[in-house]
Amino acid sequence: MATRGSYAKGVAKRDEILTTALEVIARNGYRKTSIRDLAAEVELSQTGLLHYFGTKEELFAEVLRKRDEIDGAELGVDTSLTPAAFIDGLVKVVKHNADVPGLVQLYSQFSAEAAEPGHPAREYFQERYRQYRDIVARFVRAQQAMGALPASLDADSTAALLAAATDGLQTQWMLDDSIDMAAHIRYLWGRLTAQ
């Protein structure tokens, strides 16, 4: 049986791997990052690295969870934010994504692959979209109750449209980096919330 110290070391090593993978993928891109590269960065063998995650796909799904954890702390969405503060936080994350193209590539690739039943990232994406839609819809409803957003705005549709727009803009940006994702999100929000 593992001792508490070895468990804590394992958790710390796993977190180090995820943090390092975020940096390497952001720098090199998803397609140009191998398990061998990541293992070398954290001074493990490939087998040693996969001991913590099982498969490459499971590792990359956990990298996306770690990215969301960090971005979520940056965005800090709660229903007490004003509409302007909410969109400022979302735009901040979208702008950050332009600085980490490798992570955007990983996200986009895995979101498409996760449509296949049994893909290691399928559950991650299902939960991620559900949580995102729930957070945004709750925010819209809270702001409507305070009179800050139009009552005619459908909260659930708004949440789904923001998720679709953000993901779609990322795909367009990967094909043409002159696309200003943040400006388009601001524009969409302005149109959705015009009173």
Image: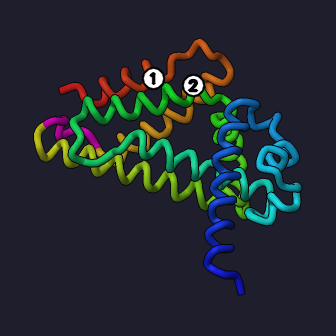
Residue 63 place in picture, x, y as percent: 65, 49
**Which residues, given as a range, are shown in magenta?**
148-154
Total labels drawn: 2
Secondary structure mostly taken by the magenta-highlighted segment of the chain: loop
Question: Which residue is pictured at 65% across the width and 37% down the height?
Answer: 103
Residue under numbered circle 2: 98
Q: Is residue 151 magenta?
A: yes
Question: Which residue is pictured at 15% across the width and 36% down the height?
Answer: 148
Q: Secondary structure at mark 2?
A: helix
Q: Residue furthest top?
A: 178
Left or right? Give the position of 117 relative to 35: left
Nearest the viewer among 111 and 37 is 37
Residue under numbered circle 1: 182
Q: Is residue 71 above or below residue 65?
A: above
Q: Is residue 122 magenta?
A: no
Residue 193 place in picture, x, y as percent: 25, 30
Question: Which residue is pictured at 83% across the width and 55% down the height?
Answer: 44
Residue 180 place in picture, x, y as percent: 51, 17
Q: Quadrant of the N terminus?
A: bottom right
Three-letter amino acid code at the position of disc 1: Ala
Q: Earlier in the sequence, mark 1 or mark 2?
A: 2
Left or right? Give the position of 161 relative to 57: left
Query: In which quadrant of the rendered view does residue 117 lie?
Result: bottom right
Q: Secondary structure at mark 1?
A: helix
